Image (cartoon, rainbow, N blue to C red):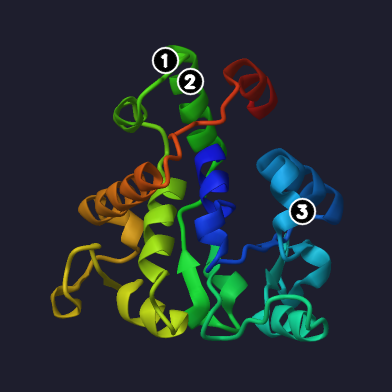
Amino acid sequence: MPSFRHYLFHDETRSWLDTAVWSSCPSASVSDLVRMCFDSDQEKLLVAWSRNQTFILKERLPTKIRTKNLDKLWEHLQSDLSLPQHSLFTTILVDDTAEKATFQPFNHLMVQEYTDQTCRNDVTIALRTRLLKGNSEVLDVGYDMTLIALVGILEALRTESNATKWLRTFAPPSILMPHQEKSSASHYGHWFSHSPTFNEWILNGVETLDRLRIPLETGLDAEITLSTSI
């Protein structure tokens, strides 16, 4: 998470990318998560929204289906002209649930869920390795690298003028490796489920972090995380 955070709020990145948080968790939980994940950078977020701003699409026991209508975010930004203005063409909703993007499916970039088991695996690796000093070492030990791959994808979007078109063309079900031409895209399901594609985006992310001189950091305090995740 630290590497991803430093990328999002690097001066170069902020010159073309705005970041917002929108979670379906309760407001108090969102506040805690934002503080833990972004620390002093939380003030640079456009918004930090909770389930209070979601729309209940359909009642379903035992849980409700909550969705995030981006129109609500765009209208919020338009109500204050001192804020950056965004639209269908400049917005990406990164979420691990397709239902959350029901209203704007072509703005949705699906990511794999960071499960309790994934967290335990990362903590186990952190306990085993303790201190890692080089980017290549972090890559080799098996941490979940979704956020690093996401850096690679965001960087590829940097020069695009229409995020919706890019996602519709290159995101699932048409999956493209960073260095492929559009005509050679292959259908593999979600981009992260195809290892060569996933690894290519990880490498793209690592190259971006190296260029910006951002080190790969896990952000895991093994002892604390292990005690709170079990």
Q: Could you give the CA–CA distance between mark 1 and mark 2, rounded to whole angstroms?
A: 5 Å
The image quarter containing residue 168 is bottom left
Q: Which residue is depicted at the point 53% across and 72% down?
A: 92
Of circles 3 and 2, the one toward us is: 3
Precedes in sequence: disc 3 or disc 2:
3
Q: Is residue 68 left or right of residue 90?
A: right
Q: Is mark 1 on a helix, strand or loop?
A: helix
Q: Which residue is depicted at the point 61% across and 71% down?
A: 100
Of circles 3 and 1, the one toward us is: 3
Q: Label 3, on which residue? A: 43
Q: In this view, does 49 lie to the left or right of 185?
A: right
Q: What element carries label 2?
A: helix
Nearer-the-camera pick, 132 or 184:
132
Q: Residue 186: where, in percent of width, then height?
A: 18, 71
Give the residue type at disc 3.
Glu
Q: What element carries label 3?
A: helix
Q: Label 2, on which residue? A: 126
Q: Label 1, on which residue? A: 129
Q: Residue 20: where, in percent of width, then height?
A: 67, 63
Q: Could you give the CA–CA distance between mark 3 and mark 1, rounded to whole angstroms?
A: 33 Å
Residue at the far left in the pictured view: 184
Q: Are marks 1 and 2 in contact (CB under 8 Å)?
A: yes
Q: Could you give the CA–CA distance between mark 3 and mark 2, rounded to whole angstroms?
A: 29 Å
Give the residue type at disc 2.
Ala
Whether residue 2 is visible, yes or no, is yes
Q: In this view, does 132 lie to the left or right of 178?
A: right
